[in-house]
Image (cartoon, rainbow, N blue to C red):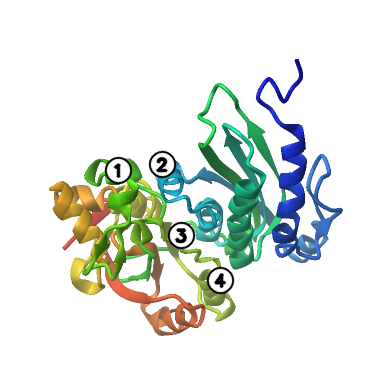
């Protein structure tokens, strides 16, 4: 008896690391010390001495049951972008710059080529957010997970000068809400999606005219990363007063998280185009509108609150980063919460 016969292939683990190295190297920043394969990822923090009061920010998340689509479609090169996006978007939402990321892949069996493909997506997410991939872990769980299954999660660490933290405390009535377009469903609500549509290769390969692509292509589109857009706004000299990442819980849970007491967000549903994938989900699942907005991002992955005088400059900065954006509402006086009108 040996470890391989018990279900854990150490040699496959070595091969996975070798195959993923080229992807990891694309994410390197000057602050990264050492190479891949150490017991800990090392990151030089000398530059934060330039900040008056540096504050570390952290975020951790996974891709939820979206990984089920990757299994069925046998497409594993973008799910890693989702894992990174869910973490770095939260850090950017607080005004921070993501510094480094670590991933964790649990699998029933280590197929080196598949693991390297997953990590290529993680690396792409890190490149998009200018965040270094400094380490990770691939763990085989024979007997606990089916051989072809895996789960992917990770965490990111970022930094912000205390004076630049976005906390919503200065939001007041009359401030304008600007929404940044999502790329689709992102990584939330897939347990509901999987009840609406049959999760089979035939179903996911079905082409829909209203989508202009197959159902699977629309659903697996990776989560949009907004780090560059928010960095552009900051570099333009605009102060973002509040920011919310529209993830699980949709509008009703996430928008109030950026609001101070006695401030109410009023969002106009017809102020931006809702991607057709959401109409298809609602129609096929007979899902009430309130539930849709309480589950999905409905086409807006990030919403920021701005002084009216800063809207034009901020929107130009967002568009320069390659993101679409819309004026979607305003702040009114009232009980903390959100109205969709």
Residue 191 at x, y = what percent? 32, 40
Residue identifier under label 3: 222
The image quadrant of residue 6 is: top right
Please state if 259 lies on the left or on the right of 148 as rendered: left
Whether residue 252 is situated above or below residue 179 in the rendered picture? above
Q: SS at mark 3?
A: loop
Can you see residue 261?
A: no
Q: Residue at x 63, y 45 (%)?
A: 103
Real-space Cα distance between discs 1 and 4?
Answer: 32 Å
Q: Nearer the viewer, residue 91 or 135?
A: 135
Position in image of residue 39 (x %, y %): 82, 39
- Location of mark 2 (residue): 65
Q: CA distance from mark 3 to mark 2?
A: 14 Å
Q: Position of residue 31 (x, y in %)?
A: 80, 61
Q: Secondary structure at mark 2?
A: helix
**Residue visible at 53% across and 39% down in the picture:** 151
The residue pinned by badge 4 equals 228
Circle 4: is it few (<14), some (14-19), or many (20+) Cα within 10 Å? Answer: many
Q: Could you say which is closer to the camera, residue 282 or residue 255? A: 282
Q: Nearer the viewer, residue 37 or 32?
A: 37
As measured in the structure, the alpha-carbon distance from the residue carrying label 4 to the one carrying label 3 is 16 Å
Q: Are marks 1 and 4 in contact (CB under 8 Å)?
A: no
Label 2 vs 4, first from the N-terminus: 2
Q: Which mark is residue 194?
A: 1
Q: Earlier in the sequence, mark 1 or mark 4?
A: 1
Label 2, label 4: how many angstroms apart (C-alpha)?
A: 27 Å
Quadrant that contains the C terminus:
bottom left
Q: Nearer the viewer, residue 204 or 87?
A: 204
Q: Earlier in the sequence, mark 2 or mark 1?
A: 2
Can residue 278 be seen in this snapshot?
yes
Disc 4 is placed on an element classified as helix
Circle 1 crowding by C-alpha within 10 Å: few under 14, some 14–19, many from 20: some
């Amino acid at each position: 008896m040996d470890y391989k016969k018990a279900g854990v292939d150490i040699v496959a683990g070595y091969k996975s690391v070798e195959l993923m190295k080229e992807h990891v190297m694309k994410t390197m920043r000057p602050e990264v010390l050492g190479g891949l394969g150490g017991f800990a990822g090392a990151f030089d923090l000398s530059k934060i001495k330039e900040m008056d009061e540096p504050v570390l920010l952290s975020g951790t998340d996974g891709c939820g049951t979206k990984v089920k689509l990757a299994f069925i479609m046998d497409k594993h090169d973008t799910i890693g972008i989702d894992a990174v996006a869910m973490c770095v978007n939260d850090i950017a939402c607080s005004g921070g710059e993501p510094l480094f990321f670590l991933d964790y892949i649990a699998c029933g069996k280590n197929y080196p080529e598949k693991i390297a493909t997953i990590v290529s997506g993680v690396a792409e997410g890190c490149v998009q957010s200018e965040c270094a991939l400094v380490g990770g872990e691939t763990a085989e769980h024979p007997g606990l997970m089916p051989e072809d299954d895996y789960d992917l999660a990770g965490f990111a660490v970022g930094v912000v000068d205390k004076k630049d933290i976005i906390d919503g405390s200065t939001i007041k009535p009359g401030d304008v809400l600007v929404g940044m377009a999502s790329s689709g469903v992102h990584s939330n609500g897939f347990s509901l999606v999987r009840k609406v549509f049959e999760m089979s290769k035939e179903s996911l390969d079905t082409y829909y005219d209203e989508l202009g692509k197959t159902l699977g292509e629309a659903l697996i589109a990776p989560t949009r990363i907004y780090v560059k857009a928010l960095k552009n706004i900051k570099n333009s000299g605009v102060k973002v007063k509040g920011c919310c990442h529209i993830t699980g819980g949709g509008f009703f849970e996430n928008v109030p998280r950026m609001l101070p007491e006695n401030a109410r967000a009023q969002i106009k549903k017809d102020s931006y185009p809702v991607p057709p994938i959401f109409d298809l989900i609602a129609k096929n699942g007979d899902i009430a509108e309130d539930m849709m907005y309480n589950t999905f991002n409905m086409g807006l992955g990030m919403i920021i609150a701005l002084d009216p005088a800063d809207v034009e400059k901020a929107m130009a900065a967002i568009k320069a980063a390659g993101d679409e954006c819309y004026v979607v509402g305003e702040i009114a006086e009232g009980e903390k919460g959100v109205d969709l009108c």
